[in-house]
Amino acid sequence: MSIEFPVTVRNLKPGERVDSKSPGMNVPMTGDPKLDNISILDDKPPIFHNAPNYDIEQNPFSFLYFDTTYECNMECGFCYNPIRKYKDMDIDKFEDMCARLPHPVAMRFVGGEPTLYKHLFKAIEVGSKYNHQICIVTNGLRLSSYKFAKSLKEVCDKHPSVNVSLSLNGGLYNDEWYEKIDHDISHRKRKVKALKNLIDLKFKRVCINANIVRGLNEGVIKEFYDCAMNTESGIITNIRFRCAAKQGRYVEDLMDEDQTSYTGEALNNYIKTIIPEANKPLHWIRDGINPATGSGKHINNPNLKCNKCCFMYYITPKLWVATVEFGSHNSTLCWRRGQYVESTNTIQPTHHYMDELSRYINTYVPDGIRQLSKHMEQYETEDFT
């Protein structure tokens, strides 16, 4: 049964979508669903009626995010969606959506932890059948199992456009960074083992990524660069850095008053001081100003605007660097990223959706949210500054 929206905000043009987003970020909701213009559901995230909606056939985004499952085997400090009681993505609805999209898109399988999604391999096959490009954004714990990593490799070999993006917020060596960002030091060795498995099995499209917190874990930039440059060419194809954002369940003590510890532009400027080739990229994909296709070709559309919140460029013929801003007003206006909303079978702007979800989580503190992992309970009253 379709759900009627109390406010009709469907299929807006880019300029209209920008105007629909107020400048305030993470402003608390009132706690009254009617005043907050949300519909709270039992088994799915709330419906956020203030965010623009797009019919699947009218999807304007080149990237789509999918919450495949809400289960997770970690409880990270910057998790934007820490509610674990919701149902997994319906695989039949996913296939129907793949068939109805007006053009192929880059799909991001997130969660929760997508490797815990029981239909992951089937979803890869379905998305690839309709020529969509799949990226699995994972914490890597299941990939520390060589058996599981090998099974995934067999699926990826059949669908060579699939990318695996491995989160390593504390890099390869630093337990303290993992403790403060991911709330657990015990996972570092498993994450490093996951990366080793991906390399040993010769996955062809591996991304290593991290949230960068100002003054804490900038050292991962050099670690990622060295790792990628010292790995056989064509395995690690992308190193990605995200600005740590005040969204979902974030670590207040690690953040300043800004919405992100870095802006996308500031973080990219910092990266230039660490990675020499970043100062003169071989080829730009996103320059932060001119809207462009996935190959870097500029899109001449006056309705599209970039706000210096993502930068992507090749530093070698087979390795590119990405800097992506999260949790800011700029990122909520992004014309590239959409979020599939299964409960309404529509698509919303990703970062607008994330912002609404964050406001909901921090106002309603819903049943099923895990505020602290067991590892962090002992530190609840300690000073982490």
Image: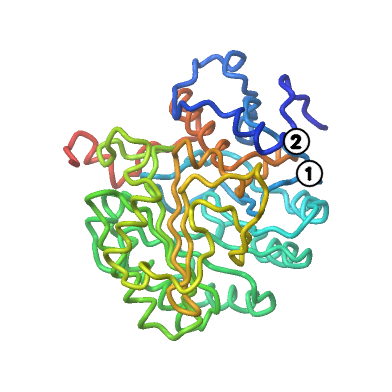
| 326 left or right of 125 in image | left
Residue 100 position in % (x across, y down) = 82, 51
Q: Which residue is at the front of the view, 192 or 303?
A: 303
Residue at (58%, 77%) from the top-left corner? 153
| 307 left or right of 295 in image | left
Classed neighbour count for the residue bearing mark 1: other residues with Cα under 10 Å, few (<14), some (14–19), many (≥20): some
Q: Which mark is residue 216?
A: none
Residue at (53%, 38%) from the top-left corner? 332
Quarter residue 293 falls in: bottom right
Residue 94 position in % (x across, y down) = 74, 52
Q: List the residue tagged with mark 1.
A: 58
Q: Which mark is residue 11?
A: 2
Q: Quadrant of the N terminus?
A: top right
- CA–CA distance between discs 1 and 2? 7 Å
Kindly indicate whether the residue at mark 2 contacts the one at mark 1 (C-beta within 8 angstroms): yes
Residue 364 position in % (x across, y down) = 48, 23
Q: Amino acid at mark 2?
A: Asn
